[in-house]
Structures are given as structure tokens and as C-alpha cells.
Image (tube, helix red, strand yellow):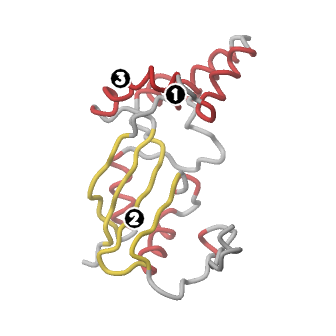
Amino acid sequence: VARDIGHKVHGGPLETAPQPDEPFDLIVGWMVLEHLHDPIVGLRKLHKWAKPEAWLALSIPNADSLDFSLFKGKGYALQVPTHIYHYTPQSLEKVLEAGGWSIEKIYHQRTLNNFIGSIGYILRDKGYKRIAESFINFPRRGGKITYLLYPLSLLLSLFGHTGRMTVWARKNDA
């Protein structure tokens, strides 16, 4: 669709993306950083493409969340082998700084999708395949039940323990 309306589109990995014609004010990566083989090289590349004082907005799984702690190797957000790295707010800060970015704010998303998906994996392993699939598919379908879970997800987000976080960072030219 973007190509059809005249935009340049690179359909491939960041490592092979061509340099843009003009620097960016804002770079957004939703559920991307954890898939990069060398995230620091990727962040440095984005840093070169950004204007001074540019923003970087990332959404990534939170390895410091309640669901990562409880479900360990059965965690929905683990997604090995496609998720190569898992980040806590502290480890993410180090990786971003090595890539030329400084965290301004971390928002813990008010969602329990990863938690519910993880329950599905546990149920599937115990032989409850039919109900397990409902839990595993919840993050894609959610629906109105998401609203019922909002009070708990809000509480967990206030303490930084939901399974996903959105990070706003600034280009660091120092």
C-alpha cells in the first residue's frame, strides 16, 4: 500500500536497508529489536539516519515482567528462536546507549496478553489442547475480555511488570 501511494519501501532486514534520502525525525520499531542479530549495530545505523534530537520509539517484550518470572521457559514472549534477545529496562538502557540513544521514558503497556498466552502453553503441555489454543490465541483476538482484565493490567503496569514495554529514546549526539 505504501508503495502504491508513492513511498519508498524496503522489504527486508534492517541490515540491508538503504540509507534514506533525508534524515528522520522519528524512527519507530514495534516488536523488532528483539529479532535483530546485532541490535547495537542496528541502533547505530538508525542513529546515523536520524536528525539531531530525533526520537526512537520501540515496543518490546519486558523480560523483567511477572510472566517472564512465573513461566520461565514456557513464556509466551520468549518465542525462541525468533526472539534472539530479551530485555529488561536496565539491559535495554545499556544497549540503547551503546547504539547512540538515551532513554527518555519507559511505558509499561497495560496488557496481559503475554501472561494469558503463557497460561495457554502450560495448559497445552498438560494435555488440554482445546482450551489451551484459546489462551494461546488470546493475544491476537482478545476481544471484550481485555476490558475485564484492565484493572489488573493497570496495576501491574504501574509496577513495571507487564509483558510489554514502549520505550521513547532520544538521539544522543554526545
Q: Quadrant of the N terminus?
A: bottom right
Q: Position of residue 52 (x, y in %)?
A: 31, 80
Q: Is residue 112 above or below residue 88?
A: above
Asked whether, in this view, residue 72 is left or right of residue 173, the answer is right
Q: Quadrant of the C terminus?
A: bottom left
Between 141 and 116, the one lying in front of the other is 141
User: Disc 1 and disc 2: Cα gap in Å?
Assistant: 29 Å
Q: Quadrant of residue 117?
A: top right
Sequence-wise first label, 1 or 3: 1
Q: Quadrant of residue 131?
A: top right
Q: Which residue is mark 1?
A: 72
The local crowd at label 1, few if under 14, some if 14 to 19, many if 20 or more residues have their Cα within 10 Å, is: some
Which numbered mark, 1 or 2, is in the foreground of this view? Answer: 2
Which numbered mark, 3 or 2, is in the foreground of this view? Answer: 3
Between 63 and 157, the one lying in front of the other is 157
Q: Which residue is mark 3?
A: 151
The local crowd at label 2, few if under 14, some if 14 to 19, many if 20 or more residues have their Cα within 10 Å, is: many
Question: For the residue marked with disc 1, what is the amino acid?
Answer: Lys
Q: Position of residue 57 (x, y in %)?
A: 41, 59
Question: For the residue marked with disc 2, what is the amino acid?
Answer: Leu
Q: Is residue 20 above or below residue 29?
A: below
Sequence-wise first label, 1 or 2: 2
User: Disc 3 and disc 2: Cα gap in Å?
Assistant: 29 Å
Question: For the residue marked with disc 3, what is the amino acid?
Answer: Pro
Q: Which residue is mark 2?
A: 56
